[in-house]
Image (tube, rainbow, N blue to C red):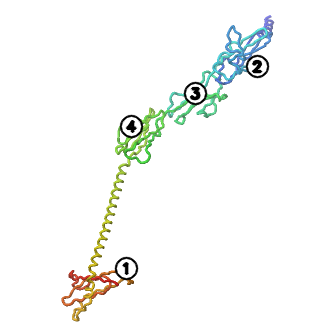
Amino acid sequence: MFSLFSLISLLVIPVICSQKWHVQYSNLMKCALKGSTTHLSGSYNHPNHHTVTKTFWTVNPVKGKEPVNLLDHPDYKGRVQYLPDKEQRAFALKLSNVSHQDEGMYCLRIVAKKDKYLGYPGIELNVTELRVEIPEEIVEGESPVLICKTTCILSDKTDFTWYKNGKCLSESSNSDKLLLQSVSSDDTGNYSCAVRDQKHLLSPAVTLSVRYPPKSVSVSISSSGEIVEGDSVTLSCSSDSNPPAEISWFKENQSSAVGSGQSFSISSFNSNHSGRYYCEAQNKHGSQRSASVSVTSTGGQKTLLYAVAGIGAALISICIIIVVIKISSRKIGDAGGQSGVSKQENNSTAVTDQTSVKPSKTADPNDLVYASVTHSRPREPQRAGDEDEFQYASVQHHRNTRYTTVEAGCQYGNTVSAGSNAEKADDSDVIYSSIKVA
């Protein structure tokens, strides 16, 4: 009896079950990226005595109101496509260019000739965007972790790709995290992420800024060429730091700062400003000073050069004046000598006569002094209009107490007689002769 009843039950139950409506969805929660294309799918069963005439998807159905077919919905026009599978009684929805306005519950509506069925509750669609999350502050040497965040879970097998300044950093990975080992200023940049199969949907780029102390601190001088007293001089300090450093200016051998800011200016430079200057850059992560630069003026050196040049010019002028005076004096002396010679021309005959006197036979040969004058130039015929040429001879005669004999040739030259009493000769014994050359 019991066996018969069990057998009847097994035969009746499938018939009863086949007469019920049933909708089954692939999943009840769906997360889609904004701008992406997503698929929603479900399958259904209906009583055997019903013939299905229409199947469609609707969103956010309201009890008591006829659901609206998405194909007829104005907000979904051109973005909806149905993918039916009659054999499996499956019905899929392809929704493109998803936006946040598309969020809601999507249900499958089945219409038969004598009945209708709504598969409620349906699939809850959430729309998300990718965004990169980084630590608030990253200091040089640290190893920060970047996270590609979403507001909902896309899927368990979602792969992510990371980009820096628009360039792919590495192959896709199933992790939504990116580890940067021991960062430096070179790691500064704009980072973004994307899902592997939708790389065109990158997250908004987030700037990663690595903080570090000042480095590469240097000083430059704006003045071109040599600095002259009275010039305006500006010193500029450059440094590489993040955040920007505060600049202080120092002069060597002075304990306190002489200025602050990116540049240090001296409006009217003088010798008191000369020295070696340097700048110091500092932020909350550290400090660094530049090498010292020498700032000196050339005003004193130029004054010395001008003084030396002036003294040299004065000395040259004095030398020129002395030379001119000497030349003038020599010309005046030559003119006076010519006038004295003219006075001696009248006495030339007397001298000639005196020199022709012969000595006595009894005279001592040692008491005689002879003057011999030789003409060094050949005589040339006198040309008309030429002035007379004169040659002069001076004879120093030492008279003997007994005899005096002087012979003088009528040639040209100067001679002095020799004898034991030569040093004691009297000036009155010197006779000048002027000889005219015909």
Q: Is 433 rendered above or below residue 101?
A: below
As helix, strand or loop, the secondary structure at mark 1 comes to: loop
Residue under circle 4? Answer: 259
Residue under circle 3? Answer: 132
The residue positioned 47% from the left and 34% from the top of the image is: 244
From the image, state whether disc 2 or disc 1 is nearer to you.
1
Residue under circle 2? Answer: 84
Q: Earlier in the sequence, mark 2 or mark 1?
A: 2
From the image, state whether disc 4 or disc 3 is nearer to you.
4
Residue under circle 1? Answer: 386
Q: Position of residue 258 (x, y in %)?
A: 37, 38
Q: What is the spatial separation of the Cα atoms under label 2 and label 1, in whole angstroms?
A: 148 Å
In the rendered view, does 193 fall on the left or right side of 120?
left
> Badge 1, how many Cα within 10 Å: few under 14, some, many 20+?
few
Q: Position of residue 48 (x, y in %)?
A: 80, 11
Q: Earlier in the sequence, mark 4 or mark 3?
A: 3
Q: What is the spatial separation of the Cα atoms under label 4 and label 3, in whole angstroms?
A: 43 Å
Contact between marks 3 and 1 (CB within 8 A): the answer is no
From the image, state whether disc 4 or disc 2 is nearer to you.
4
> Badge 3, how many Cα within 10 Å: few under 14, some, many 20+?
many
Q: Residue furthest top?
A: 1
Q: What is the spatial separation of the Cα atoms under label 3 and label 1, in whole angstroms?
A: 121 Å
Indicate the amino acid at tag 2. Answer: Pro
As helix, strand or loop, the secondary structure at mark 2 comes to: strand
Indicate the amino acid at tag 4. Answer: Gly
From the image, state whether disc 1 or disc 4 is nearer to you.
1
